Image (cartoon, grey):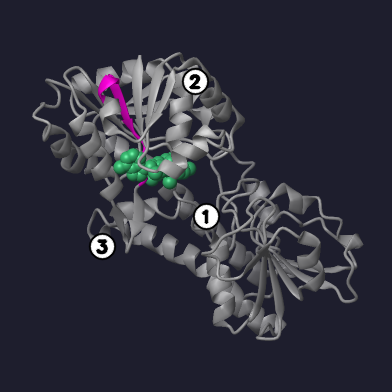
Amino acid sequence: MRVGVIGLGFVGSSVASVWLRAGASVTGFDISEPRLNSIKQGNASEEAAVVEAFRSGLASGKLKLTSSEADLKDSEVKIICVPVYLRKGRADLSYLQEASGSVARSLKRGDAVIIHPSVPPGTTRKIVRPILESSGLEVGKDFALIYSPERIFVGHAVDDIENRYPTVVSGIDQRSLERGAEIFGKISKKGVVKMPSVEAAEMEKLVEGVYRDTNIALANELAMVCDELGVDFYAVREAANSQPYCHVHLPGFGVGGACIPVYPVFVSSSVSESATKLINLSRELNDSMAKYLASALKRKFGVDSGTKVGILGLAFRGDIADPRLSVTYKLVQELKGIGVESIIVHDPMIKSDPALGSMLTQNLEHVLERSDVCLLATDHTAYRKINWDAINRSTPLILIDGKGMLRGLSSPKVRLYGLGYGERSPGMREKAVQ
Ligand SMILES: NC(=O)c1ccc[n+]([C@@H]2O[C@H](COP(=O)([O-])OP(=O)(O)OC[C@H]3O[C@@H](n4cnc5c(N)ncnc54)[C@H](O)[C@@H]3O)[C@@H](O)[C@H]2O)c1
């Protein structure tokens, strides 16, 4: 099979490598020359399986990298993997529209076009289809139009596509659906889930994110309730989740990443305001956690302009180098809002970030030794391995665990508090029950 992949970012490079591993010839098209050069230099991804598939694809000639859309003509399956961002509360579909234009100009009879990015329901039919049909070809009759959301996580995307989940597939008509099922049947060991419409498949992906955002909001609220009651939320959660119908998520200082905080907005901006009360409230609650923490720090620990604050973690999830929409940006902003002037962020995997608005370092010792207060924002494995007793300091560090990962810690060098820690919470809530 000859496959064209449009957009070679995290999703596109993972998708391209899966098709290479399945024996397909792949044309990888990206508008960014720096990205293409970086791929050629062996930096396609953090994932070894992707790097290796690209290396052997380039060596064997099975992979062609290009910034010329004319090169997409050869491929019979064209897969769009460009991003759809959230801008000013709505989905920015400009990259998808541009990429659809490139596909339209290289479309021929018999092709299948697959749309991967997560989008507001209706996008494939109302936005992408007319652009593709501007080629003069008719969907259903001349080419297949398939929507299939990517269900992958940074760090193990290839395994996700090949082994972990069934692929959700939809088609603009029955023939497109069957063609999509046949195509994905070649790479997905867990098979395919055929959806009744493209809108249903678009919504399915968003629902995965909404479920998690809403569940995290519930966990945040329950953690704050437990703190007020002086009850250990984590012990409660573990016991409650031992019952098979209970799946309470973990609380935190907010929700980051390119997906979970974004998809609820794709849903709410697609329907009337009153239709998404719980979804909106969950988003609001999760977004307010950083402000809540900052005001608790000010009230309970007297954090002010003279306090040196360290933040452990910039990545939105542990053990990855991806800071997209990380809660740490909000923490920095809220700390500045209460007057804090000295903030240092540590991340073991991210070396620089001009958007952060504070100093970023990889020197963990320095942050632990010079800070008065440290906030643990990301569950990097490196933070589990810290030898707290060995920190060189004369007064204990006030350490606020936002991930519930240091609960067993006891060290004279640390005064440990945590969201959901109950009696060892930072006293974030005034006691209501006396
Ligand atoms: N990142 C994730 O974990 C994840 C998981 C599942 C789904 N998704 C979805 O996939 C989409 C893509 O995400 P990503 O993480 O790969 O983005 P990314 O920013 O890593 O990569 C996008 C790539 O597309 C290229 N590009 C932009 N416009 C183009 C065009 N018109 N033609 C060709 N190339 C173009 C860019 O140069 C870039 O290399 C997201 O919007 C999201 O909806 C992402």
Disc on res. 57: 2
Residues under numbered marks 2 and 3 in contact, where contact means CB atoms less than 8 Å apart: no
Left or right of 184 in this view: 382: right
- 305 versus 349 height, above or below: below
Q: Secondary structure at mark 1?
A: helix
Q: Which residue is mark 1?
A: 216
Please state which of the two labelled residues, at mark 2 or mark 3, is closer to the viewer: 2
- 308 versus 263 height, above or below: below
Check disc 1: other Cα within 10 Å, few if <14, some if 14-19, many if 20+: many
Could you tell me the amino acid type at mark 3? Glu
What residue sits 37% from the left and 38% below the top? Answer: 30
Distance from label 2 to label 3 (Cα)? 48 Å
Q: Is residue 189 visible?
A: no
In what quadrant does ligand 1 lie? top left
Residue at the extreme left: 136
Task: Locate residue 162, reporting x and y percent.
Answer: 50, 23
